[in-house]
Image (cartoon, coloured by chain):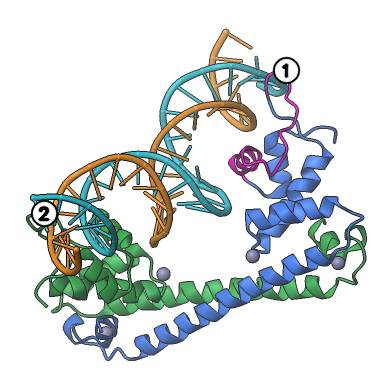
Chain colours: A green, B blue, C orange, D cyan
Amino acid sequence: MKELSIGALAAATDTKVVTIRYYEKIGLLPAPPRSAGNYRLYRQSHLDRLRFIRRCRALGFTLEEVRELLELSAETERDCGKVDQLVSAHLVDVQRKIADLEKLAAELRRIHASCRGGTVGECRIIEALSP
Amino acid sequence: MKELSIGALAAATDTKVVTIRYYEKIGLLPAPPRSAGNYRLYRQSHLDRLRFIRRCRALGFTLEEVRELLELSAETERDCGKVDQLVSAHLVDVQRKIADLEKLAAELRRIHASCRGGTVGECRIIEALSP
DNA sequence: CTTGACCCTATAGTCGATAGAGGGTGCAGC
DNA sequence: GCTGCACCCTCTATCGACTATAGGGTCAAG
Ligand SMILES: [Zn+2]
Ligand SMILES: [Zn+2]
Ligand SMILES: [Zn+2]
Ligand SMILES: [Zn+2]
């Protein structure tokens, strides 16, 4: 593999073509050189970087967090404390979201269990939503 | 209480003023009559409806789901099966989100635990993100 | 009569993409 | 050479659920 078209890069990273162009536009993925016909031509470094981005996204990091992780990962001599910190902060984000959703689920189960059938006018669900 | 200004309605429902205007714009809350000075004047029915909307939102229903719930709740003679169905479908939504986030959290914990300190170049976190 | 809190409209921005219009490029088969 | 087709290009708009800002108008207290 010497160079990849945007479609090939998309296939190799399970990303949509438009998403790759979007990452370029917001400065997350550097603009690659172009062919004679103005096609983007990607190299291994782009592939690596995009894989990194997609892996982070799959872990729920925001694009801003990904940007920071990318910057940090380039400073190889630096102490990795900041990386550590970013990951644990994000873990806290995720855990808080889970806790919030658990509360919703419990409340929804409670409301749902209260339905005794009949008409909407009698339904306890609607009642529970209209306090 | 006879009529409420938008600010009073906002305070009574823990909603932002702009959000109320937004709900009106998308047709979720009916446009109220106006005062001589072109101020919105809300009545009890608006308060009830907005409370219903906010309660649904707090339970994580989308505005489209809320719209359906509002429509259903108006048909008091109808069988409440659809309401039941909507609520359980949403509970499934929430449970799926929780399951997804649990997976992320587990993976993040795993990655985080792998860090042995040192430089970014040696960090197992960065390694884990660069497969 | 002025101050300040409140209200009005209209427009643009957030995040992370996704969709579509309207066109250009490159390659295989005929 | 020519046609068809997959792929690529840019630009703009859209999604959900708001939020923010600009540039005004209204109203009651002091
Ligand atoms: Zn995060
Ligand atoms: Zn019921
Ligand atoms: Zn739902
Ligand atoms: Zn580390």
Give the residue type at disc 2. Answer: Gly
Displayed-image quarter of ligand 2: bottom right
Q: For marks 2 and 1, give the CA distance.
A: 64 Å
Q: Position of residue B87 (x, y in %)?
A: 73, 67
What residue sits right under mark 1 in the picture? B36
Q: Are marks 2 and 1 on the same chain?
A: no
- Dominant secondary structure, magenta: loop
Q: Chain of mark 2?
A: A
User: Which residue is at the front of the view, C1 or A85?
Assistant: A85
**SS type, badge 2:** loop
Instruction: Say whether residue B102 is left or right of residue B13.
Output: left
Residue extent of the magenta highlight: B16-38
Q: Is residue A20 magenta?
A: no
Residue B128 on image: x %, y %: 29, 85
Circle 1: element type: loop
Between tags 2 and 1, which lies in front? 2
